[in-house]
Amino acid sequence: MIKKKKFSLTLINSLSIIIFLIVVSFGISIWAYFSTEKVLNHNLKQYFNQTKNLTKIIVSNEKKSLDEITFKISKILSKVDESENSIERLISDSISTDQVDLLYLEKDKEIIDFSNSLFDTDYIIKQISKKRVKEGNIFLIIENKGEKFLILLSSKKIINQETGRVNAKLYAGKIINDNFSIVSNIKENASLVDVFVYHDDYLVATTAKNELTNIESLKNKEIIKNNDKIYFNERVDISNNDFINVIYIINNSSISLLKNDFMKAGILLLLFVVVSFTILYIFTNRYFIEPFSKLLNFAKESKDNKLVIYEQSNILEFDNFAVNLKDIIDELRDLKEQYARAIEGVQDGLWDLDLVNDSAYYSRRYLEMLGYNSLDEVDDIKNFWKKSVHPADYKNTLKKLAKHLRGETSFYQDHYRFRCKDGSYRWLRIRGKVFFDIEGKPIRMTGFHTDVDEIIRLQKDNKKKEQMIYQQSKLASMGEMIGNIAHQWRQPLNVISTISSSQIMQIELKIDKKEETVRDLEKIVDTVQYLSTIIDKFRNFFNPNKELETFNLEDIIKENIEIFETSYKSHGIYLHTDLTPVNIKGYKFELMQVVINLINNAKDAIQANLKPENKKYIFMKNYIEDDKVIIKVSDNAGGIKEKIKEKIYEPYFTTKHKSQGTGLGLYMSSEIIKKHFNGQIYNETIVYEYEKGKYKGEEFTIVIPINVNQ
């Protein structure tokens, strides 16, 4: 593992203070800068709004001047009806044509041009006429041979005072491109550096010598600040959904002032940082670093020395913590001693594996368990575990260990054979847990070994005994089956014997009764087939399928009860069944062995406790309750005595004569239900009524989960 670099607490404290002060200073600087910038932007917008208002006033005055010219001329022309030359003379007498760039009259669809301009006024007037300008004043853009003209135009109708008819329409206009008075007036009155008027990317008019190089960026923003200039952009709508951009430029002296102020503030802030750092450093070292260092030294000394004395500091919390820390260290030392005594007391072997550094620790008891006196006697300590686990157990326990390392199990638990120093193997029970780092990699594994060699060997001996008991129980069942076979075959064999004797007699007496002979032979054939069916059922019962299978409880019980019906009917016992179809997964032969065993026990109890004239009943039923199958078998034999109830499930315990029972039936039934069906079997003495009679007997109950997990 890569060792992480360590730092001094004093260094961390100093760096923390410096970083904190720098961040605070930077934050204050940014706040001050943006606050100043915000104020400046607000003032610029106010200035921009004033410039726009001033521009509107100047343009309004120009419009008013044009309106006065058109009004004055229209008044003169409305009173006379002269020739073109006369009209031109009248206009020249009333105003100077130099005041306007365009001056023309529309009369009877003819245009009379009085303009005194170097522009191609004929073309411009024709383009204006096409636009059908309404009366009043308006801005227009006219293009001619790639050149654009921004025109401020004023129009007035000339009405004959006598007739009231419109004789003509008078137009007067100024071409902004050539008329620098408007843009110059705006520049001077607003104290601007320059003024630019653009239509799209075309420069219409300006007070500057050169065009702007950054026109595209200027047109998309309202205010742009450069190092030495500030640009204001105003979009002005003109006729026919068209517009122009008026760009005002002023000197940017405010930003330079802002930079100077910011530098001064920065120097003052730096001084503040240095002074604050010095004060904080002295304060934290005196009241934090030094007391904490004392506390650390005290903790180190207390770990090995119970009599160490803490030198009190100026910090109350540190002094209180030192007292509590001493108590904690003493308590941990006591716990360590208690833990060591506990490990020694339980006689378990402790092991601890360092998966990073590839080292291991084994306790003294762990080594003694395997016959070692010390760890020095182990040849290869790194591969000790791998070489010591029994080869037959190694693969299986490795799978369980891998699952735990992947985090699939909370604890690692297993048992396997482990080789001792003398070469023999002992059974050990292992319990352990893997610990992971923050990246999810295993770094340590700790656990215990318990010597269970004697327990497992006893378990194996018990298992052999259980198998022997099971075989004895099976042999006992076979004896009962043979008795049942004798009962089942007695009547069919009597039928065959009687028919055979009758046929022999008829042959000896030479009595020819062919039809009767055929009927008797057919009856013999039917009887033989019945005996063959019984043989098949007994063979299936004693050669069960040892694999798990799903079977219907009602069908399997009814089928097997038929085999034994002669054994209880011959004794006058009535078997009443109330069965419900339900599917169970398990070993059907073993379940039937339990059911038949309970019925036989009930039959034997009835024979032993009831007189021949008494009514004899065995009841069997099943139902489902809480996802479990309940099977009940009861009788009317009077019940089991209380003093022997707790013993009936013990092996070899029986109330019958040795010639009649082995005492293994209920023991094996209980083992089968518990181990192979995850269920339980219990009994109780009950009192019940049946067909107006009151009876007492023992009721055995089998409880099996529907989803049996094997």
Image (cartoon, rainbow, N blue to C red):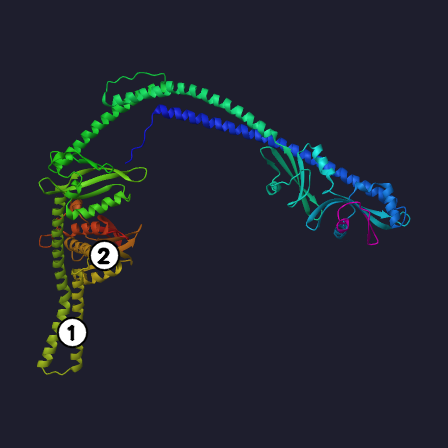
Disc 1 is placed on an element classified as: helix
Whether residue 116 is in magenta: the answer is yes
Q: Is residue 514 left or right of residue 322?
A: left
What percent of the width, then of the height, locates residue 701?
24, 51
Q: Residue 548 carries which label?
A: 2
As drawn, is 444 to the left or to the right of 666?
Answer: right
Residue 332 lies, in percent from the top left, at 25, 26
User: Would residue 654 be visible to someone looking at this image?
Assistant: no
Q: Which amino acid does label 2 sit on?
A: Leu
Residue name at image x 74 percent, y 40 percent: 179
Amino acid type of the residue tagged 1 in the rendering: Ile
> Within the image, what quadrant is residue 491 found in?
bottom left
Query: Camera-side residue: 333 or 562?
Result: 333
Say which residue appears at 63% left-offset and 40% top-offset.
Answer: 212
Which numbered disc covers residue 326? none
**Which mark identifies residue 524?**
1
Please tell me which residue lies in front, 10 or 171. 171
* Closer to viewer: mark 1 or mark 2: 2
Q: Distance between the residues labelled 1 and 2?
A: 40 Å
Residue 216's spot in the image, x, y percent?
60, 43
- The reply, left or right, for residue 30 in relation to residue 63 is left
Q: Locate the N terminus by quadrant.
A: top left
**Range shown magenta:** 104-124
